Amino acid sequence: MSATLRLAKQLIACRSDTPQDAGCQAIIGQRLAPLGFMLETLVSGPDEFRVTNLWSKRPSALINQERAATHLIVFAGHTDVVPSGPREQWSSDPFTPTVRDGKLYGRGAADMKTSLAAFVVATEEFIVAQPDTPLSIGFLLTSDEEGPALDGTVKVVEMLRARGERLDYCIVGEPTSIQRTGDMIKNGRRGTLSGKLTIKGIQGHIAYPQLASNPIHLLAPALAELVGMTWDAGNAFFPPTSWQVSNIHGGTGASNVIPGTVVVDFNFRFCTESTPESLQSRLSAVLDKHGLSYELSWVLGGKPFLTTPDTLVDAVTAAVQAETGLTPELSTSGGTSDGRFIASICPQVIEIGPPNASIHKIDEHIALTDIEPLKNIYRRVLENLHAQIQAPSQA
């Protein structure tokens, strides 16, 4: 059994249903401390939703030298998992890591405890080979990624920003691959902006429509216009911004009552060609044009971020090619991740992890053949960045 597989199984055995960490971060901290990492735990959130975060950093060997430029790479991820669902539907207990048919089964196997194990083992191997590396290495772990994400990574980022701490590079271990580890990496994510719209009418008897005002009828022309709008054209890295209705609630449940209100829940998944402010303004303008009486509330779940090809993309691409022979596809598809918070203090954020076909499903798993390549890719990224830092000093 490889060191990565052994540690992955140890982490999967921790019943860390969000927001519980269930000891995962302590296990990882015990591996990092002997390598010279300083450990800092930040507990946040209300008692009924207590979140555990770990910030850990190993300073550069150049930290006390005059020419100590910052070269800090951070491995980021989450120790919490989504609920396992009905135990009887699993082929084996979701928190008893099980190897069968060439796969490791368990909740978190793909999302993302194997990535965490690979982070740790890759770092151990790298530091053994390069104990005096000028590269600073950090770990940012949370137990609030699968939950509301209000007391997790965002809180650590706030703490680091207040200290003036700046990250140069960050690798998030989200499962980004499709068929084989390394075939796709995320170099950005779309933003998410949700709204709740209440259209006001006048309730009345359905047989006397002249005495009422049906808000569903009033909404219909504006809704059709919003559905047909082009919000932006996207760009080379992002598809066009999308607006989607998720729920419509209207009526009292009776078939003879015109409702007094209709409530529409909707969401923008937006790219860097739009801003939250521009989307809010354009949507409100349509409602105003149609003369609607309405209330509208907004929740910004995260702004888009993008890492254009540069040092980190090059280092990750080279690592994938050397380990697997694949050239990874750059993508900004999918939902949000904690990269949206980290990008505010880090100019280069990349997500790379194992195939994601089984995440959040019954019998979540990762192929054993994906585990060591993943660890080796992470180690090779460290080696590539180390070599780049060393090169100018040797010139």
Image (tube, grey):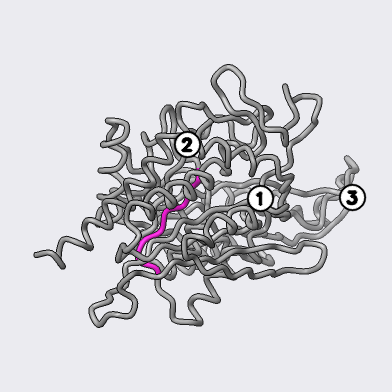
Give the left or right position of residue 64, taking residue 159 as reference: left
Q: Return the residue nearer the eye: 342 or 269.
A: 342
Task: Kindly identify which numbered label has been placed on residue 205.
Answer: 3
Q: Residue furthest left?
A: 395
Total labels drawn: 3
Point out the tag, 3 or 1, that comes first from the N-terminus. 1
Query: Which label sits in the foreground, 3 or 1?
Result: 1
| Quadrant occupied by the C terminus | bottom left
Q: Is residue 126 above or below residue 106?
A: below
The residue at which mark 1 appears reads as: 80
| Residue 76 horizontal/vertical position (percent) | 50, 56
For mark 1, does the 10 Å Cα neighbourhood hold few (<14), some (14 to 19), or many (20 or more) residues? many
Label 3, label 2: how many angstroms apart (C-alpha)? 58 Å
Q: Are marks 3 and 1 in contact (CB under 8 Å)?
A: no
Segment tinted magenta in the rendering: 167-174
Point out the tag, 1 or 2, that comes first from the N-terminus. 1
Q: Return the residue nearer the eye: 24 or 197.
A: 24
Q: Amino acid at mark 1?
A: Asp
Q: Are marks 1 and 2 in contact (CB under 8 Å)?
A: no
Q: Is residue 131 above or below residue 14?
A: below
Residue found at x 76% / y 53%: 214
Q: Residue furthest top?
A: 101
Residue found at x 28% / y 76%: 68
Q: Secondary structure at mark 1?
A: loop
Query: Which label sits in the foreground, 3 or 2?
Result: 2
Quarter occupied by residue 46: bottom right
Q: Is residue 253 above or below residue 94?
A: below
Q: Amino acid at mark 2?
A: Pro
Task: Kindly identify which numbered label has been placed on residue 354.
Answer: 2
Q: Amino acid at mark 3?
A: His
| Quadrant occupied by the N terminus | top right
